[in-house]
Image (spheres, coloured by chain):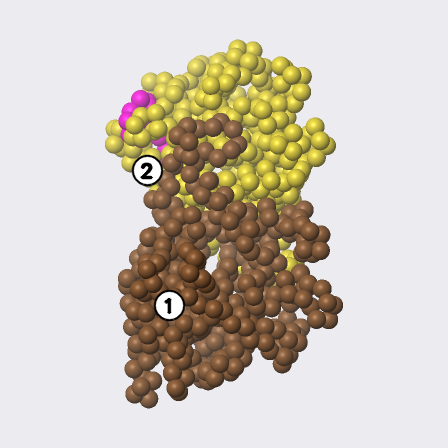
Chain colours: A brown, B yellow
Amino acid sequence: MSDIATGQPADMATDGTHSVGIVTPKVERFDEPLPLRSGRTLDSYELIYETYGTLNADASNAVLICHALSGHHHAAGYHSEDDTKPGWWDACIGPGKALDTNRYFVVSLNNLGGCHGSTGPQSINPDTGRRWGPDFPVMAVRDWVKSQARLADRLGIERWLAVVGGSLGGMQALRWSIDYPERLGGAAVIASAPKLTAQNIAFNEVARQAIINDPGFHQGHYADHDAYPKQGLMLARMLGHITYLSDAGMRDKFGRDLKTGTLSFDYDVDFQVESYLRYQGEHFSSNFDANTYLLMTKALDYFDPAADHGHDLARCLAQAAARFLVVSFSTDWRFAPERSEEIVNALIHAGKDVSYLQIDAPQGHDAFLFPIKPYVRALSGFLERLWQEREAG
Amino acid sequence: MSDIATGQPADMATDGTHSVGIVTPKVERFDEPLPLRSGRTLDSYELIYETYGTLNADASNAVLICHALSGHHHAAGYHSEDDTKPGWWDACIGPGKALDTNRYFVVSLNNLGGCHGSTGPQSINPDTGRRWGPDFPVMAVRDWVKSQARLADRLGIERWLAVVGGSLGGMQALRWSIDYPERLGGAAVIASAPKLTAQNIAFNEVARQAIINDPGFHQGHYADHDAYPKQGLMLARMLGHITYLSDAGMRDKFGRDLKTGTLSFDYDVDFQVESYLRYQGEHFSSNFDANTYLLMTKALDYFDPAADHGHDLARCLAQAAARFLVVSFSTDWRFAPERSEEIVNALIHAGKDVSYLQIDAPQGHDAFLFPIKPYVRALSGFLERLWQEREAG
């Protein structure tokens, strides 16, 4: 079940029974310079994160959640008693859920370049005393993983039981397995791809052009002009949203239902699906930073770990030591099952331990957010196995 | 072979051998009011059109071409000796081609609401003495067909040998078979659909919002403000263009090829596909009217002939008397083969004469513009059969 208005999976636990309850974000500051893929360096930065569950004595029960394009650190629970909207993956994180917080210590952070509390375009550049804005370094997935490794150090986690992520988050899980093979037991790569296709990049480019050409953008310095590229961000989100849903899912949800019962014969809203998309775009553009949106789309475009290995993904993954769970969804056309199977084939070719499931689900790319039974079972079973091996090992 | 720069099939006949040669558009004026689906009436109007080949004595060799969203009357040949760009379907219209002008008299018009010479938003509204702009009536496919029937009357064509169209043009061919069953021998419905899905409408809505929210739009009265929603139209076209191509086609054509050989790590063009899309958007937005674009997308959204027949397409098509050729293309995801098959199934259910081909082609929706061999053979065979029957009958 999903809430049409927010696009969030409906909260199954408003009574708190299966909720992690009220959570308080924490912030860690890092003063060791972070060298970036772009050649630039971030001299210091902060990461905002949340944790759910309790880290055990030997720090062997920690699971890292990596977020997707518009995600953030608030993955589960509520921020206050009055808070009605749980974290974005509340359906899967909590006592007795896929990521069972009775057993695991779950860590979820906002990535660098984000707009929810970690250092990003809205932060002050210490060199200038002004907002970074568009001058914030373009981040690559490997940069995020490096910053996540430092957060792990800070939390006393030498090795994650697993790193888990959907979409752009799955790319981070994959990158973890390549860059820090000894620091994770398992990688769950969900609704992801080893690199974007030309069509994926093309959609991202239209979204970027919508933002950049908005007269409120001011070359990214909108904050200095008391302006905001709201329409551009709205368009970007409307377009993105179409690619998160499936054709069949949209047909089932909206069909050709009219908003008012009759055709307008003007250029205003006629169909429910138009109204829904406008609401989504409107809501998102009031709550997200445009420079962050650009940065996230570029990180997606640039991700291509095989490029450093002669474009041979199997060779690239040869260095991985994790067990892998790869999950795709039947109606996901943004990162179709074939894209997950590229990863699976490369892993098999490289002789790695990989389980693959294609889940039959109507929600398109968004399916990774939903507690779909075989998907939940796969996630919990994967973690259970890693947990048993840890005890045996 | 396609010309990447223009998206046009490459001209196979610049030497004139298989070209209709130089053509001159004609204009017909109509003073009988045209009642429209919207409830409004167009008191008078002009239609611009071209003809290729010669109408025979009993006017039995006429074929009508209906254009798609951004099409126009100039379907074949050249406008002058210096003209290097042939009409949009030159690959299929001409001596010895699929629509063989040695035998057939081919008529191609610009639809009402267009921006290439027929009455539309850029025309003067006789009631106000000013440009129609956004006040030009929203057109439905049935309105176009009615205006085309009047053009046929004017040309002395009681009955078309066939009405042929791709995409939105295919919807017109289908509508012809329903509204004027006795006035056509055959209907060729290519890369089309019996109605748009929610996803189709959603893409159109994003395109409309891009145009409408452009500060140069001025509620459609841009001409009065010496302005133009160029960025919005550019975005609309970039987005549209992605849906005209296939994922596989884009992969083959562009892959992840870089524009300059290295990643920029800023928000400018990195990949060839971005550069290509920008060029397409730029070129189109310099040559098309924004109000016409809005109008064409609404005509697409509204098309749903079964709606007047209890949403039963077979019942709706029961009144048709034409022979049908339905063609789809394997990689077309804008109007996928399944959408053509909805038409075919309804025709079979209604006991009609229908041939159906799904053509294996990498070009996506755009494939209908290309002279792909089995497709050309199907078109020419279909016309040949209609022609033989006419002689026999």
Give the structural element (helix, strand or loop) at label 1.
Answer: loop
Q: Quadrant of the C terminus of chain B?
A: top left
Residue A242 in view in this figure:
yes
Looking at the image, which residue is at 45% across and 43% down?
A276
Q: Residue furthest top?
A: B32
Residue in the foreground of this view, choosing between A184 and B88: A184
Q: Position of residue B156 (x, y in %)?
A: 49, 13
- Residue at position x 43%, y 51% from top? A6
Q: Secondary structure at mark 2?
A: helix
Q: Label 2 amino acid?
A: Glu
Q: Is residue B105 rendered to the left or right of residue A374? A: right
In depth, the one of A155 and B251 nearer the eye is A155
The CA distance from mark 1 to mark 2 is 48 Å
Circle 2 residue: B342
- What number is the disc on residue A39? none
Using the image, name the chain to which the residue with label 1 belongs. Answer: A
Q: Which image quarter: residue A379?
A: bottom left
Residue at the extreme front of the image, as rendered: A81
Residue at 50% over, 64% down: A72
Count of picture labels: 2
Q: Position of residue B256 (x, y in %)?
A: 55, 61
* Label 1 crowd (10 A; few <14 / some 14-19 / many >=20): many
Instruction: Establish if A43 lies above or below A19.
Output: below
Q: Does residue A192 appear in the picture of this structure?
A: no
Q: Are marks 1 and 2 on the same chain?
A: no
Residue matched to label 1:
A20
Look at the image and give the residue range highlighted in magenta.
B313-328
